[in-house]
Image (cartoon, helix red, strand yellow):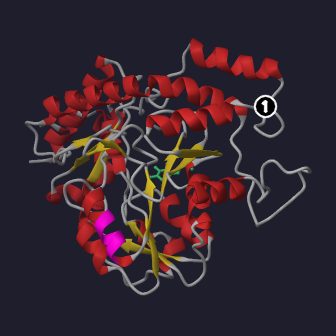
């Protein structure tokens, strides 16, 4: 293909990207927020009831007994690890292709994240590598249902049982995803979700921890709210060291409405993924693989460049953006290479993560994308591929 067919080589200014991260918010969310504002009850403390309603509805949706709403996915994970008593000297195994919070919350507890490699097809934690990383210090495993694809929960659960380890699922990208007919977030001791703006459903910011265990639920609630037990004669009683990770009533009101739309949002994301599969199948790009017996909710659509052009990924991304469409890279390098983990994990090398993170590119699947947006994105990716892949 001739060089000047690509906008980037014509020296044209990069056109403004369409705003793909615009959350799908309708009149229902606006009405719910106004109702809370008018009630004057903005916090769950002293009278609010939206947070409790959201916790009940979200845990019911996931078939889990209890839910604890928090300020973010990060604080949901932090509440979970601290409630399970993870602290100094402990090790927690995490996948090496994930968002920083999966592992940073382990550092927050003074414990050590240990990075396992990922499976070549699902990009989730490899159960085989996970088992090889277990030591006497291992206390928990955090599988991540990455990009909306559920991790191999049967294998991970049996390893956890064999070695008496806790499981905290990081389901921040997988609301509504299923593994063998069961919703993710309901398998482990805790299941954590994020309601950040880009997620499959949103509250702006927000998070949730699910658990089936009453004792653990009580501990989660205590930690979320200053370690202060419910139903005391006075509010100023502190039984354990806790946080203030309370979700607001405003966030919960949005969450309740968004939850009603979640199945529709996921349907849209799956349709958008289907569009990309159809359009890109004839290229030499490696498209996502879907394991048997799962319901994938395509938080996004990860694609691998052929190995021979992995070195020009940055240019590839710039060239696609110059065509006027959005594209991203999740995640550009193994998490253990970040400065904050490097000191503890200097010698780690996970070959699948090294390879996949070096050539992954991420296409958006957000429900707000129109057929034209999807066509523009795939046309741009194909055009740029034609130039780079010879
Ligand atoms: C896999 C994963 N874990 C945890 C988080 C943290 O969630 P939040 O941004 O709500 O703190 C995210 C959010 O990007 C995520 O993608």
Q: Is residue 301 left or right of residue 34?
A: left
Location of residue 90 with respect to 290 vertically, above or below: below
Residue wearing tag 1: 42
Q: Main secondary structure of the magenta part?
A: helix
Comparing 184 with 20, the one in front is 184
In the rendered image, is residue 236 in sight?
yes
SS under mark 1: loop
Q: Is residue 17 magenta?
A: no
Q: Is residue 277 left or right of residue 235?
A: left
Q: Name which residue lies at 58% across and 53% down.
A: 76
Q: How many marks?
A: 1
Query: Which percent across, then down, holds residue 165?
Result: 42, 72
Q: Residue at x 21, y 29 (%)?
A: 274
Question: Does ligand 1 reach within 8 Å of label 1's beta carbon?
Answer: no
Magenta region: which residues? 157-162
Q: Using the rendered view, name the quadrant where residue 376 is placed.
A: top left
Residue 221 percent across, percent down from the top left = 67, 53
Indicate the quadrant containing the N terminus: top left, top right, bottom left or bottom right: top left
Answer with the quarter of the image where residue 20 lies: top left
Where 254 sits versus 382, above or below?
above
Q: Nearer the viewer, residue 304 or 390?
A: 304
Q: Is residue 340 left or right of residue 246?
A: left
Q: Position of residue 327 (x, y in %)?
A: 36, 39
Q: Is residue 257 left or right of residue 336?
A: right
Q: Residue at x 41, y 33 (%)?
A: 14
- Can residue 251 be seen here? The reply is no
x, y percent for residue 339: 52, 72
Q: Is residue 20 above or below residue 118?
A: above
Occupied quadrant, residue 349: bottom left
Does 160 appear in magenta?
yes
User: What residue is drawn where x is 49% and y is 52%?
Assistant: 212
């Amino acid at each position: 293909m001739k060089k000047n067919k690509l906008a980037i080589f014509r020296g044209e200014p990069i056109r403004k990207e369409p705003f793909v991260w615009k959350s799908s918010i309708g009149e229902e969310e606006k009405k719910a927020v106004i109702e809370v504002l008018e009630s004057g009850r903005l916090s769950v403390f002293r009278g609010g009831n939206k947070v409790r309603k959201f916790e009940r509805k979200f845990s019911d949706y996931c078939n889990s007994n209890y839910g604890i709403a928090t300020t973010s996915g990060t604080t949901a994970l932090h509440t979970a690890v601290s409630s399970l008593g993870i602290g100094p000297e402990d090790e927690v195994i995490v996948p090496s292709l994930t968002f920083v919070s999966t592992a940073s919350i382990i550092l927050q507890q003074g414990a050590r994240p240990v990075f396992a490699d990922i499976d070549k097809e699902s990009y989730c934690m490899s159960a085989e590598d996970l088992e090889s990383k277990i030591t006497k210090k291992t206390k928990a495993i955090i599988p991540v249902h990455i990009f909306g694809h559920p991790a191999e929960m049967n294998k991970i659960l049996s390893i956890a049982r064999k070695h008496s380890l806790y499981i905290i699922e990081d389901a921040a990208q997988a609301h509504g995803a299923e593994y063998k007919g069961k919703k993710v977030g309901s398998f482990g001791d805790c299941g954590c979700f994020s309601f950040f703006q880009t997620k499959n459903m949103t509250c702006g910011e927000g998070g949730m921890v699910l658990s089936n265990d009453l004792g653990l639920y009580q501990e989660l609630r205590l930690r979320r709210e200053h370690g202060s037990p419910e139903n005391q004669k006075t509010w100023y009683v502190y039984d354990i060291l806790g946080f203030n990770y309370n979700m607001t009533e405003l966030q919960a009101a949005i969450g309740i409405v968004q939850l009603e739309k979640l199945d529709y949002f996921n349907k849209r994301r799956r349709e958008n993924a289907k569009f990309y599969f159809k359009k890109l199948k004839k290229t030499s790009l490696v498209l996502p693989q879907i394991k048997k017996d799962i319901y994938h909710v395509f938080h996004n659509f990860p694609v691998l460049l052929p190995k021979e052009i992995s070195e020009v990924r940055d240019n590839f991304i710039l060239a696609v953006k110059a065509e006027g469409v959005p594209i991203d890279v999740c995640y550009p390098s193994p998490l253990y290479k970040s400065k904050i983990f490097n000191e503890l994990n200097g010698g780690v090398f996970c070959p699948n993560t090294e390879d996949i993170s070096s050539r992954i590119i991420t296409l958006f699947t957000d429900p707000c994308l129109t057929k034209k947006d999807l066509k523009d994105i795939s046309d741009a990716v194909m055009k740029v591929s034609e130039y780079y892949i010879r």
